[in-house]
Amino acid sequence: MRRGRYSFAALVRHALSGHRRWPPAWRRREPKRAYDVVIVGGGGHGLATAYYLAAEHGVRDVAVVEKGWIGGGNTGRNTTIIRSNYLHPESIALYDHALRLWPTLSLELDFNIMFSDRGVMMLAHDLHDERILKRHIHANRLLGVDNRWLSPAEAKAFCPPLNIDPRARYPVLGAALQERGGVARHDAVAWGYARAADRLGVHILEGIEVKAIRRRGDRVLGVETDRGVIAAGRIGVVVAGHSSVVLGTAGLRLPIESFPLQALVSEPVKPVFPCVVMSNRVHAYISQSDKGELVIGAGTDQYVSYSQRGGIQVIRHNLEAILELFPIFARLRLMRQWAGIVDVTPDRSPIIGPTPIRGLYVNAGWGTGGFKATPGSGHLFAWTLAHEEPHPIVAPFGLDRFESGRLIDESAAAAVAH
Ligand code: FAD
Ligand code: PYC
């Protein structure tokens, strides 16, 4: 039995004392009047940015300003699928940079984020799907990123509950498997980064909303919050589904549309699903959490909205598809459903880098697929803020691409947002 703060005895003591002396994982701070860097948004990306600023660049006078609670946005609402099997070299470099950070993240943060590289399998239901997936496999392998084609029988061997009957409504013609892909515990990612950043002196400010970005001419000055003004020479806006709203207060218009994206979980059952399966064609994806719940996700609503609920017809279609693909789940009961708001760009790639306002940086537009990028996004965005220029990996993802036309079309790899 381990002794110390995390021993069994300590666990029992905390439980019996109503957790009164449970040491908080990060401290509650009063906001200072000024910081070197303010990060707006306490999701995984914002917290990771703050952590790497402090850990790798010695920039420790940092505040993360979160209007709700840490990880309460899309970080805590997503289906946790992690992979790097994108199409274009720029995206493969970006997402694989993140994928390479996941396996050692628990060690880095000294916090178990429960990364499980159980493999992510994408299904092909017709010739068109098959060609697209094979094109991705070739593009990935050319750059040394793992991805391989499976026959229907091999797909079933990888994921036994899969229905590969050729007469099925969504017949399985084969699948692309990225074995290094998998899942992680989303809340733990936020908590782990928050705790590690706090230990390095970062202020985590929960329950404080940024109402406006303050600027003078083309220079940023700070943020106006519901607790007063906080000055900062560098500001990173990392607010997922609210990027247009927050950056709109600085007079910037982003090429972004915001949609609800839904997920559901079933009642917990014993381990039955050792895989992660995505069907990009029918917008359905599924895995089993360590608690035993099946974690199921759907496609985006067809209409823009900031309602975190989503349309019933979307999950109806989604569950019909799930039951066609996995008939053994027909009698399982669902426990919860929710939505998050995802910011979608025209090319389904994120926007990372400086804005026309000096000192103001954006990290947005990850759409339906930013969880997998969390460590890489934070790592590269921190570098960008510290050096006041884009890291070479994120340089192609600047706002300027919507003027130059150098778009990075990842509609097919984005899987859900197309
Ligand atoms: P968030 O976690 O949303 O953090 C942004 C924070 O900013 C929020 O906490 C919010 O409260 C805060 N904020 C907003 N406005 C303000 C303000 N004015 N002042 C202060 N704070 C503010 N991606 C994958 O890779 N794999 C998946 O399987 C996957 N599944 C998904 C399923 C669903 C249902 C959803 C909704 C998304 C999914 N995603 C997935 C996408 C992924 O969740 C996001 O891209 C990612 O989590 C974004 O992280 P973030 O830290 O940028 O955003
Ligand atoms: O980007 O892999 C992904 C994803 C899966 C479900 C939602 N997004």
Image: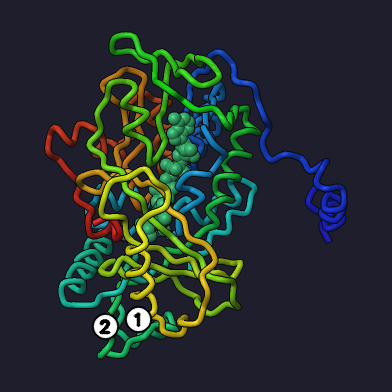
Residue farthest front in this picture: 312
Q: How busy is the neighbourhood of tag 2: few (under 14 within 10 Å), some, or many (20 plus)?
A: few
**Residue found 28% across the figure and 13% down from its top:** 218
- Alpha carbons under labels 2 and 1: distance apart: 7 Å
**Residue found 60% across the figure and 78% down from its top:** 270
In the foreground, 153 or 335: 335
131 is higher (above) or lower (below) than 34? below
Image x and y of residue 386, in percent: 43, 26
Q: Secondary structure at mark 1?
A: helix
* Amino acid type indicated by mark 1: Glu
166 left or right of 227? left
Residue at the disc numbered 1:
324
Mark 2 or 1, nearer chain start: 2
Q: Is residue 372 visible?
A: no
- Name the quadrant of the C terminus: bottom left
Residue at the disc numbered 2:
169
**Residue found 31% across the figure and 49% down from its top:** 93
Q: Quadrant of residue 324?
A: bottom left
**Residue found 51% across the figure and 16% down from its top:** 230
221 is higher (above) or lower (below) than 247? above
